[in-house]
Image: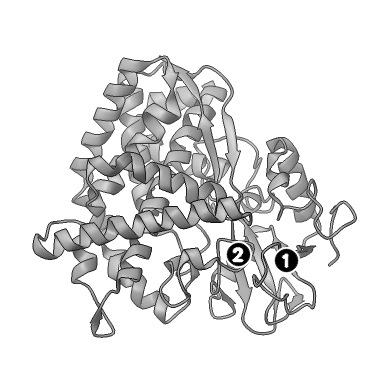
Amino acid sequence: MTPLDTNRNGNGTAGNPLRPEFWQRPISEIDVFFARLRAGRGPVFFPYRPTRPGSGSGSGSGSYGFYALTRHAQITEVSRRPDLFGSAPSSSTLEDRSPAFGGSAEGSLLHMDAPRHTVMRRVVARAFNPSGLRRHDGMIAAAARRVVDELLEKTPCDFVTEAAVQLPLRAICAIVGVPASAYEDVVRATDTITEIANTTDRAGLGAVAEAVTYFSTLMGDLARLRRDRPADDVTTTLVQASVDGRPLTDAELGAFLRILLVGGNDTTRSTLAHMLHLLTDNPGQKQLLLADLPGRMPGAVEETLRHATPGTWMRRNVTRDTTVDGHPLRAGDRIILYYNSANRDEDVFEHPHTFDIGRSPNPHLSFGGPSPHHCLGAHLARRETALFYRELLTRAPGVHATAAPVHTYSGLIHGISRLPCAR
């Protein structure tokens, strides 16, 4: 397992998927790169030189770096063994988390392992399962109608700004209990965290810390309100919750709000934008969908999630010596699960680069593998996307993208920052 195409140094860029510069390459080149990794079958080690002091001393292999897992079966195997492949101390940053993201005891669910993760996730899991979300269907459908109204009034316009940002923002804020007056600040803080979460420069770290502080302050205000005036929202659930016989701390409440708002915005925003782009580029598939919107919409949503893979990767940390796909790994090794590559695995998906809304089965890993860390908002993202596109395509079946999308990779997120559209 030797480094592959890393420009002959430990911090190669064009051929090292740990470096931000790698994701600036054309998507076609990124796909070819991961196809090469999959063809090698086993995990591939990529060296990585930490740039922030104190961010880690190295992996169990004796060299600071990461093993890239790119095949569907490998990632599924690892996901099913959280005892061997943990999320602490970090699952969403290449280096160990900055103190700006909270201490290990009171940080995000993303960076916790059982039993603490199990207890903390249970606090809000019921609100986001299918039955819990059902009571919000009317609200989500109404929000979708309003967003479509506004979009059609403004077309031609930027689909991302006028629709893809708006629907998930309004939906998750309503579910959590965030007032409309905070919407712009929520979007700004969310974008800061997702766009530069892996930053190591002083300015970037300061911006992330400021965004984290904003969410903590917002949650403090909401918590005080809901202690006095409970409502049917997730904030009320959180302030009334008891964990190990005690209420959640301010830091825990802030971390919950952060993951709910950031996660509840990004995946759906990206999926909505990717779906318009894919339907525009594949008119035959769009006609199939229009011929039976209720029947084919679920398949169209799932195929968009697979083809676009809004959540690109997650990190896991080996807790004790083990093997993956027959290859030895040592305690302390770090691995990256590349969901974008798993969703192109030729062993699982026939014609994996083809957008096919009738694809069945479609066992994509866009919400993570089968594990306790499977995306909490998966059902919400699916429901928002389906309700929005049923409304939009019923009223404006000719809506389409008028130019190529501006793709953005923050490493973790494969999004679209701009997508001009017209009716």
Residue 222 picture location, percent across and down: 22, 57
- Identify whether 186 is placed above or below 131: above
For label 1, the residue is: 67
Q: On the rendered image, what quadrant is the C terminus found in?
A: top left
Q: Residue at x 67, y 69 (%)?
A: 53
Residue at disc 2, secondary structure: strand
Which amino acid, by three-letter code, is at mark 1?
A: Tyr
Left/right of residue 20 with respect to residue 186 in the rendered view: right
Residue 263, compared with residue 46, is above or below; it is above
Count the marks.
2
User: Residue shown at 79%/78% (left/top)?
Assistant: 62
Asked if residue 331 is positioned above or below residue 154 in the image, the reply reads below
**Could you tell me residue 97's position as x and y percent?**
56, 67
Residue 124 location, quadrant = bottom left
Q: Earlier in the sequence, mark 1 or mark 2?
A: 1
Task: Provide residue 141's location: percent of width, then percent of height.
Answer: 24, 37
Q: Quadrant of the N terminus?
A: bottom right
Amino acid type, callout 2: Arg
Query: Secondary structure beneath disc 1?
Result: strand
* Residue at 61%, 81% in the rendered image: 319
Q: Are marks 1 and 2 in contact (CB under 8 Å)?
A: no
User: What residue did someone put label 2 on?
Assistant: 315
Within 10 Å of the Cα at label 2, are there few (<14), some (14-19), or many (20+) other Cα atoms?
many
Extreme residue in the right direction: 8
Quarter holding residue 168? top left
